[in-house]
Image (tube, grey):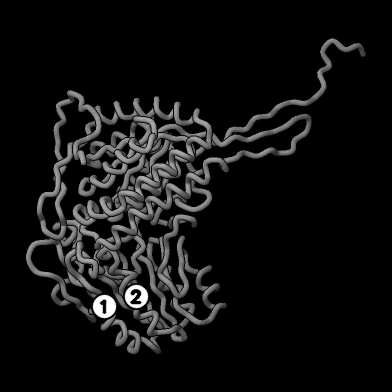
Amino acid sequence: MRTELQQEHHSDAYERKLDVINPATEELVATVAAASPADVDAAVARATRAQAHWAALAPADRARLLRRFAAAVDAHNEELAQLEVREAGHPVGNARWEAGNARDLLDYCAGGVERLTGSQIPVADGVNLTFAEPLGVVAVIAPWNFPMPVAAWGTAPALAAGNAVLLKPAETTPLTALRLAELALESGLPEGLFQVLPGEGPVAGNALVEHPGVAKVVFTGSTAVGKRIMAQCAAHVKRVTLELGGKSPNIVFADADLEQAATAAPGSFLDNTGQDCCARSRILVQRSVYDRFLSLLEPAVRAFAVGDPSDESTAMGPLISASQRERVRSYVTEDAPALIRGSAPEGPGYWYPATVLEAAPGDRTAVEEIFGPVAVVIPFEDEADAVRLANATEYGLAGSLWTRDTGRALRVSQAVRAGNLSVNSHSAVRYSTPFGGYRQSGLGRELGPDAIAAFTETKNVFISTAASTAGEQP
């Protein structure tokens, strides 16, 4: 596949390259040209032209092309998965799921193209209609932790609504995004409609956010950067959707199936090596079963297979980079109260062992997003205490609770201030249901039946039906 930018570079004295490193081996995978502000300008111009053509197509034709794109992603699932393994260090089974998620979302959104209807509102002396019209050019700034799925979360509904998309992948993980853009062209999407702009956040990302030709920005990443982007968009009265950080609770009540809860817990904070905004990294356990739960959790954590991402049996791979590993290490000092510590491969690669710490509610490890394979365990007394601890965070993205009491499940689900909750499960993300956070975890919702509408403007049209009196005799 081509790993250079799929566009002509302009002579603005900006010549930067991005090295893509395999996190499991520290070997160079590819070198990709980084987009400059001039490249962004040219891409916006191409996207604007392509969007006008795309929006003019019959809805059935747009839906057909998106389904063809989904089929191409499906046909290249293994290729895309292997790229994800090499650039992000994801276990191959996870990477196949991620390619499948992108495929499924394209299919799902294709089904919404012909159902993006307006409404007829009863009014006096006329007919009132509303129309859902595309915004124009949408910028999607995707993260490195889930490069394919999150790129699709913004791209698929935006395209379905009739927009053009400029996707800026993370500096470390541009390869799957570039390949998706190639597959879009091969599937018949108009040239310029879906472009990928690898580049540095302060350069290409900033140029996209500031560009007057970009109507909306979709950003997934840290809360700090999200706040800056929101402020920039406010200056231009530009729409923005933000999916930011999290410090999600996993609440285990005494009446829960403790064996099931303990068996499921490792995957909730070790999946993707803990590099997941939804990671249930605060395990809150009712005090009366605290010791019993920990005795069940320890073998489950140690059984979580860590190793070569290309090995079918691997459940957890490396962290994305050396700098990310140093960040995680900064939270786990030598004298940290580690209750459980797993193993990790030695030698090349950005490895870090699964770690479970004992913590008090106000500890740094219990408050800040670590973004690594580290969880803290905190006891609670009763239902009210569990809710208090669950809400003792500036975030509000996800969470789980384990109980056999249906009434409690409903009460606690309503009381916890988070956008995505699961009962007796850690499943938080489905392409057919809304996803997003409260408070510092973001703004707006992605996925689900309303995702496409988030990429439209509502136009209101009134048509008078009153009889004309011009020229009539009294």
- Residue 50: horizontal and vertical position, in percent? 40, 28
State the CA–CA distance, disc 1 to disc 2.
8 Å
Q: Quadrant of the C terminus?
A: top right
Q: Which label was assigned to residue 241?
A: none
- Taking the image as drawn, is residue 461 in sight? yes
Pointer 2: residues within 10 angstroms few (<14), some, or many (20+)? many
Give the secondary structure at mark 1.
helix
Q: Which label was assigned to residue 301?
A: 1
Q: Is residue 165 above or below residue 327?
A: above
Q: Residue furthest front?
A: 75
Q: Is residue 458 left or right of residue 416?
A: right
Q: Quadrant of the N terminus?
A: top left
- Residue 420: horizontal and vertical position, in percent? 45, 62
Which quadrant of the view contains residue 195? Answer: top left
Query: Who is closer to the viewer here, 418 or 175?
Result: 175
Query: Who is closer to the viewer here, 438 or 463?
Result: 463
Q: Earlier in the sequence, mark 1 or mark 2?
A: 2
Amino acid tagged 2? Ala
Query: Label 2, on which residue?
Result: 265
Q: Is residue 258 above or below residue 349?
A: below
